Structures are given as C-alpha cells and as structure tokens.
Image: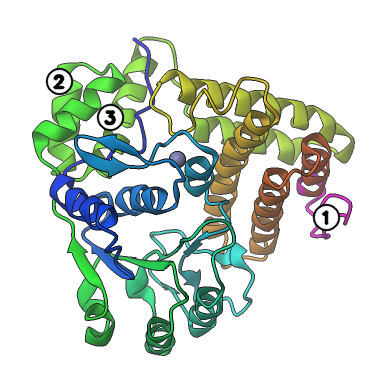
Amino acid sequence: MSAHPLPENRLLGHSARWAALARAFASGNIPQSLLLSGPPQIGKWTLALRYAQLLLCPSPIEDNGLPAPCGQCKVCHQVKIETFPDFKVYRPLVSSVEDERDWVIAPKMMSGSILPIHVARKFGNEAMRKPLIGPRKVMVIVQADRMNDEAQNALLKTFEEPVSGLSIFLLCDNADQLRPTIRSRCWHVPLGLASDDEITDWLQATGADATQIDQAVRTAAGRPGVAKREIERLIAAQNEEEGQPFVSRQQQAEAFLRRLEKSSPVGALGFTEEALLLGKQWWDEDQSVGTATTGKKELKKGDAKVVRSSVALFLDELASVYRARWIGNVTSSKAVRWSDGLDQIRKTRQYILRNANTNLALDVLFGHLISGQSQRLPERIAR
Ligand SMILES: [Zn+2]
C-alpha cells in the first residue's frame, strides 16, 4: 500500500463560517479586521490562508454557489508559500532573544515565546503602506494571544488608521487573552470542531484502511491537524512492518543533515545535487495528489518556478530539522551554530524564490553549513 500525502488546503468543519466570510467578500463588505479563534490544530491557518487567497486572487471562481480563490494562479501560489508582497505574516519570537531578525520565529510549542512591541511596531509601519500589486493587502498575526500589553496597545493604534484595502487577520487559541478593545474591533469568528464524518471522508484520500482511519478519527476528536498527523504516523508504522520502511521527509532531511555534519567543505557540490533531487521528488509527490494549490497549468514540469518552489520545499524541511536541533541545544554553546544555520537556510530560501541562481545559492549555503561559519552570503547571491 502506498501512502498519499493529504491535500493540505482543504477546509474541514467550518463551512458555515466560510460561507459567511465568502458572502461578505461577494457583497463587498470585507471585514477590516478578523479574529479567528479556536483550539490548536483545528484549521485556523487553513481558513485564514484560503480567505487571504480569496481577497487577493485576481480570478476567483465559484464553488458551491460561493466565491472561492482559484487556487491555480501565481498569486494563490505565492500566498500559500508566503512570498506574495501584499500578504504578510507575523509570528511570535523567542522571548530571550532581543535581536529583531526574523529567524527567531518561535516554534508553536515554545511557550516562552511572545509577540513583543517591536514586532507590533513593524506591523504598524507595514500596515500604513499601500498594497503593491492589487487593490487589497492582507496582514496576519499568528498566535495573536502571545502579544504582550505593549504590543496590544501598538496594535490598537494600527486599527485606528488603516490604509485602504488592508485586511488584518488575528489568529489565536484563546480570544480572552486579547484586550476587549481589540476584540471589539474585530469580526470574531470562533472555530469549532470538525465532525468525525468530515474527517473520515478526508482521510479516505490517504489510502489508509478503515481501522487506521477509525483510529485517527478517534484520536483527532474533531481536530483535522491531529487527524493528519495521526494517519501519517499509522501509515508509516504499517509500512515498516511490511518491510518497506516508509521514510518521511523529516527523516530524509535528518539523514541529509547527518551527512552534512560528517562532510568536508569540498563535498558541498554533491549536496546541492541531492537537495535538487529530493525537492523535485517531493514536488512530484505533492502534484500527484492532484489537489495541490499549485496548478499544473500554471507551473509546468521543468519550469524554473517549479525548480525554485521544489527547492523551497526541501529547505523548509531542512529548516525544521535545524530548528529542532536548536531547541534541543538552546542552552548550550552549540545553539549559535543551529540558529545561524537556520538563519542561512531561511535567507537562501528567500533569495532562491526571488530568482537568485539556485545552484550557486545552494552551493554557498551547504558550504556554510558544513563549515559551521556564520558569514554573510555574498552580495552577488543576496540580490
Ligand atoms: Zn488565484
């Protein structure tokens, strides 16, 4: 049995909420600020991303009588990978780090992370700028309940003088952590649990058997994000028993890192080739599901955009391995090495998506990661 990755952008269990938002869009009453709240793994990000795509997509379609993003165009794709210039996402930082550089974005489980005042100010400055591409612009704060008092005050000021066309989405687990003055300025959309039936339907796409699906649905208890994680775990375990070990992307990235650690700087070239290969393989897997938001019409195989996007897929996975190492070593002297590596990977991803020479950027990146140096990337790449 083969494991199929689940289609990511599917919205589960929030159809009434989506309908209300889509109708607001259709009637031109787009909320200036939206507050999406609900327990973790319930689909807040999925809903926010889809609505952002709807607001920004130049050619929305009709789906079940409601407007929906086309999901195929360049804008929809760029929103999904967070590179669209009029779609900005802000996330909590690790509280112990004073530095403003954004590689200190905190992983979800890091409870000490906050959204400090300087992030809120940055947000406020950005909110005053007009959209660059179309008539609208979307700015998101993920885990907005991590804003401290100062940051919440600064955000209130942003609400007072919004630039025209701006929509602000706040995502949080617990809306009570936000000041009433902020809540009262938002259209509050509390999200509930998905039904077991909906999750079951969704999981059928994985090719898992009925027992596995049943088990994942029970574990999920209405949270689609948990269902996805659980079914992937069950499928991986089963394939191992059948003697064909299922190697997850995370495990492949781990193996890649272990080889990097053992390598000398002259070995960097081979890593570039391997990264390109893995990225391409993952990209193809995602496309074969058929429901990926990146349409085949827009992005043909061999297209330079495909190469860039598939390398970004690879770098995302490598970054998550680095982030895990960093968290595991956060109190030791090795922490710097992992945080620098994370920084380099993140920058390289941006350069590549902004049309830097892919092979050259990867060569330089792996050279740095191998030597563990924290030099800046050369200007010719960082353009
Ligand atoms: Zn679109």
Residue 46, position as x, y percentages in the image: 33, 47
In which quadrant will I find the N terminus? top left
| Mark 1: secondary structure | loop
Residue 116 forms part of the magenta stretch: no
Mark 3 surroundings within 10 Å by alpha-carbon count, few (fewer than 14), some (14 through 19), many (20 or more): many
Q: Read off the residue under disc 1.
A: 377
Please name whichever residue, 105 or 339, is drawn nearer the observer in this view of the structure: 105
Left or right: where does residue 45 sit relative to residue 244?
Answer: left
Q: Element under label 2?
A: helix
Q: Magenta region: which residues? A: 369-383
Above or below, 282 against 352 in this view is: above
Q: SS at mark 3?
A: helix
Q: Camera-side residue: 319 or 294?
A: 294
**Residue shown at 37% from the left, 86% from the top:** 156
How many discs mark residues in the rendered view? 3
Residue 154 versus residue 251 in the image, above or below: below
Q: Is residue 351 left or right of residue 10?
A: right
Instruction: Say which residue label 3 marks.
Output: 231
N-terminal of the pair, mark 2 or mark 1, is: 2
Select label 1 or label 3 by which is in front.
1
Q: Which residue is the site of mark 2? A: 211
Q: Please tell me whether residue 108 is drawn above or below residue 315 in the rendered image.
A: below
- Is residue 158 found left or right of 359 in the rendered image? left
- Spatial CA span between label 2 and label 3: 11 Å
